[in-house]
Image (spheres, rainbow, N blue to C red):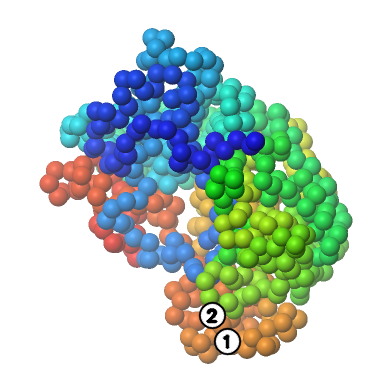
Amino acid sequence: MRSTYILIIACAALLMGACNKKLEIAPPSKVTPENYLVEESQLAAYAIKLYENLPIFGYFDRDVHTDVAARRVYDGRYTPGQWRTGQSGGVWSFTTIFECNYFLETVLSRLEEKKIAGNEANIKHYIGEVYFFRAWAYFNKLDSLGDFPIIKTTLKDDKQLLTEASKRAPQTEVARFILSDLDSAILLMGANAPTGGTNRLSKKCAQLLKSRVALYEGTFLKYFKGTAYVPNGPDWPGKTKDYNASYAFQSGSIEGEISFFLDQAMQAAKAVADAVPLVTNSMTGRLQTANQAFAEASEANPYCRMFSATDLGTFSEVLLWRDYDLGLGVSNGIPNNVQAAHNWGFTRGYVDGFLMANGLPIYAPGSGYEGDDSIHLARVGRDGRLWLFLAQPGQINILKPSSLGTHATPVVGYPDILNLIGNHDQVTGYMSRKGNVYDGAQLGNGKGDVGSIVYRAIEAYFNYMEACFEKNGSLDGTATAYWEAIRLRAGVDPDFQKTIAATEMPKEALNNWAAYSAGTLIDKTLYNIRRERACELIGEGLRYMDLRRWRAMDQMINTPYHIEGFRLWGPMKDWYKAAALTYNIGDKSTVSDPALSPYLRIYQKTQSVLAYNGYRWAMAHYFSPIAMQHFLITSEGADVSTSPIYQNPGWPTEANRPPLGY
């Protein structure tokens, strides 16, 4: 029987009350009685409850609202003035941090006094899990807010003490603290979990997260140096509270910090990548069709099955995954969402960014690109990840129709770009089929039990490649080997130097935000590393973080960007004659005017849409604002200037107000 550790966390026997999100609330006196957290199984149960904090990307839609994937409704982050400082809520919270701190301060002392019964190695593993979750919680704060208070213990119910503890530590110190917690997790956790297999955390998961955190901080510092976003930078808001960043910043050597974090990223990533081989893709270079043979080969392909199997424990690349069990009444709607493409789709920019199988960009002489007058043509001869995961009309979705569920789409139809009812529309015309399940029984309402990946080892390959180039300006033998392995698995010519030589950055910049950092076109090799990352990791929730750490949206501060879908105004328009396409008729338009672009512009149908004139960016949006309640709680009276907390660059300390200048 498969383990269900990650999924059935609601059933974990935790004798623990809910924690208030406010820092000021002291731990209840009976959160854990004296006879709890004194033996191995109790530590395991406490830790499993923390798995609720991990993401689920089985739906493969977690990169929407970026340049690679879009929903029908625009995101206010890209219409400056719409995103505003909140009155309450937001990312500034301490619930998970509190839970981890209570566990660690309770269990570590008992472990030292030998007051915990059970296998010592298992006990240490579960302690390592909690270190991991504290690091995970702090990374979420670092990613969204930058500077953040470092709190390692539970605190007494004393306003002065709690207010003092609210001081934000510079983000470099936060990042180092996260790495320290992950080092503890790596030291304590075993290569495999005591129970649960890859449904529970392992040493490799901590190493992977360490590489992600270190790469994030190293690249963030590199691209934001000299701004208010970096400690001790010009107008850094921490200066107004007499805070001082430590480590290399004290001597003014930001380059030393960048090098440190990139080194850490490379070391941690290599530890994972060298230990974990990539899952085999058995469909490289053939069957680029939409027939029965393609469906059967896809279902048998280990690379495709890695995203749609019910048991992911057999895939080496999957380091951690969520399990579901219909027999226990624990199911998901992942198969339904994949086949219905629930209200999202790939963008034109994303599809155009894929290379040809020969390694050339689509615009390069001799590439063999056949154009995009149809979705079929857009797939022909391309990177295997595109023709595997871009749906084509007529494609077979179900191989077992005798057990057909009520929500199945047996054959892919034409892109339903006009369906405004519910979430069953294909928005951009480019529909994803990553994670498609060919078993019709999975397609009933809530009848799915496919697994959901949380951590995949290939990220470590990318983290090493990027950190290596960012640090050295070139790729070493290890990075070269990783890149070649990735391209071979994708069915692309492994000679990435050929790709780099044929890359024209002005053309790439037209549809890919990652062509920029700080408003300037980047090096061609670095761009192709970023391109490869996007082609492989689509839908897995890393794109928005990547774009922000790369500072890849400055160019939209002054120049709007239009999200586009497939080429509607060409041969494909004939599909829609019966659907009565309308355009340029005020608020009755159903599609965008062909005079604007031959490609479908999903936010440029009616002028009443705020994003009609394109996506824009505000510098303040690289970080989230801190809600007003947190300033008020830690201030004297209602004078927020007395709070030790400072607002993020460009955001006001007034509720319901946009970034300064909007």
Count neighbours of disc 2 (C-alpha within 10 A) and say few if under 14, some if 14 to 19, many if 20 or more: many
Q: Amino acid at mark 1?
A: Tyr
Q: Residue at x 68, y 57 (%)?
A: 441
Relative to residue 169, is residue 127 drawn left or right? right
Label 2: which secondary element = loop
Q: CA distance from mark 2 to mark 1?
A: 7 Å
Residue located beneath label 1 in the image: 583
Measured from the top left, where is residue 331 in percent x and y? 56, 50
Measured from the top left, where is residue 93 in percent x and y? 34, 43
Position of the C terminus by quadrant: bottom left
Q: Which mark, by number, is residue 605?
A: 2
Marks 2 & 1, CB-CB < 8 Å contact: yes
Nearer to us in this view, 234 or 171: 171
Residue closest to the far top: 113
Position of the N terminus by quadrant: top right
**Upstream in the sequence, badge 2 or badge 1?**
1
Measured from the top left, where is residue 543 in percent x and y? 57, 52
Q: Amino acid at mark 2?
A: Lys
Label 1: which secondary element = loop
Residue 235 in view (yes/no): no
Residue closest to the far left: 637
Q: Which mark, by number, is residue 187?
A: none
Count neighbours of disc 1 (C-alpha within 10 A) and say few if under 14, some if 14 to 19, many if 20 or more: some
Residue 84 in view (yes/no): yes
Nearer to us in this view, 189 or 263: 189
Relative to residue 289, is residue 239 drawn left or right? left
Q: Residue at x 54, y 76 (%)?
A: 420
Measured from the top left, where is residue 531 in percent x and y? 67, 52
Q: Residue 656 sits in which quadrant?
A: bottom left
Q: Residue 94 sits in which quadrant?
A: top left
- Relative to residue 501, is residue 429 depicted above or below? below
- Relative to residue 66, is residue 462 depicted above or below? above
